[in-house]
Amino acid sequence: MTEAATPQSVLVPLTEAAIFLVVTVDEGGEDVARELLADLSGLTRAVGFRSLEDSLTCVAGIGAGAWPRVVGGDAPSGLHPFREIAGRKHTAVATPGDLLFHLRARRMDLCFELATLISGRLAGAVTVVDEVQGFRYFDQRDLLGFVDGTENPTGAGAAAAVLSDEPGFEGASYVIVQKYLHDMDAWNALPTEEQERVIGRRKLSDVELSDAEQPANSHVALTTITDDDGEEREILRDNMPFGRPGAGEFGTYFVGYAAHPDVTEQMLVNMFVGRPPGNYDRILNFSVAVTGGLFYVPTVDALDGLADPPSPTPATDASLNVGSLRRSDAS
Ligand code: HEM
């Protein structure tokens, strides 16, 4: 019997700082990428151990395009390229990305140091397609001024929401990221009561609007989804504000972890297409999604296992020469 594999640091408390790094792997850069992934837990320890109380973590995600090139073998069932979702008015765009690094800590310098080490190791082997430094804003608010993250699952509920039980991939997760830019002038022109009807919660107290007050096109209404048995389907979010006030840039980097990406995808359909179609999320009138990516988050054991790919077989099938992220191979 194999021991349970250790998930990456998906289930960690919200932090003050984060860096989101998305790269594509250049042709010929596969070995460098694989070796970095195998060394990631060691690199994270090397930086984080210098200030343990600041809780540095780094989650690595692998995109569908990178799987056969960097990992090989059977892919987990939920891994596919992020699918663009086009509503009548707003579109959730799909943008390139082979690897995602989600670094979190209580201090930006730790994230920065680790991102520097990762980038250094990957130099010449990858192209950086997006890099965002996020910060925690007043009492966990996003730049729209609302407390963000309140209804996240906690404890056993959070673990159930994000950890896969697919045979061979137990303990892994999926993550969807999107970078949103806000039209702050339009948003600030709305009276607070109207902003509350867009989000579905009170701005100051963070209390959810009552059923009678809750508009069908509020963000909360459209992202609350249930399965056939009426059970709520949840994801774990750790959105981060980012921006450059001098350049007029104000954004939210959305990050949503789930045991299977179809949960987050259903929320996105509700937001962009609408439930029913046409009844789309009003938050999108003030927020444009400029990136979109879906990544598989292997367990720590599986990542570490990439250092020792199965003995190369003198075969023509290149995929036999690379490690597999299946838990059974890693343990
Ligand atoms: C709830 C902000 C994008 C899923 C919320 C809340 C805020 C918020 C303020 C209410 C407090 C809370 O429970 O966290 C934003 C902003 C976004 C964004 C500023 C980007 C512009 C998304 C996306 C998804 C999502 C893309 C999923 C695909 C959820 C869920 C809830 C939520 C599941 C909790 C609903 C509930 O059970 O009450 N969001 N969000 N959000 N959001 Fe978002």
Image (cartoon, helix red, strand yellow):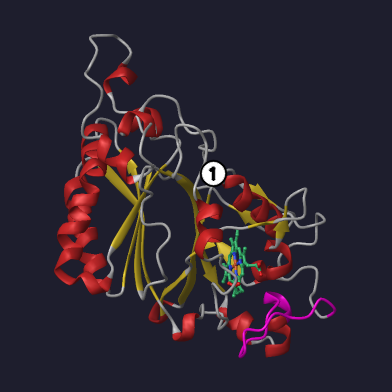
Secondary structure at badge 1 equals loop
Left or right placement of residue 253 versus residue 218 in this view: left
Q: Position of residue 121 (x, y in %)?
A: 17, 47
Task: Report ligand 1 position as a quadrant.
Answer: bottom right
In the displayed structure, 108 sits above or below 12; it is below
Is 221 placed above or below 309 here? below
Q: Which portion, as a residue range, is magenta? A: 197-212
Q: Residue at x 46, y 30 (%)?
A: 75
Residue indicated by mark 1:
82
Q: Quadrant of the C terminus?
A: top left
Question: What secondary structure is the magenta-colored segment mainly?
Answer: loop
Label 1 packing within 10 angstroms: few (<14), some (14-19), many (20+): many
Three-letter code for the amino acid on which mark 1 is drawn:
Phe
Q: Position of residue 40 (x, y in %)?
A: 24, 49
Judge whether 44 appears above or below 85 on screen: below
In-image side of 49 versus 88 (left or right): left
Q: Using the rendered image of the protein, determine whether residue 179 is visible from the camera's viewpoint.
A: no
Location of the N terminus by quadrant is top left
Q: Is residue 199 magenta?
A: yes
Q: Position of residue 241 (x, y in %)?
A: 45, 73
- Note whether 28 is above or below 197 in the view shown: above
Most distant residue in the front direction: 1
Q: In which image quadrant can residue 315 be found?
A: top left
Residue at coordinates 41% horizontally, 69% vertically from top-left? Answer: 13
Residue 248 colored in magenta in the image: no
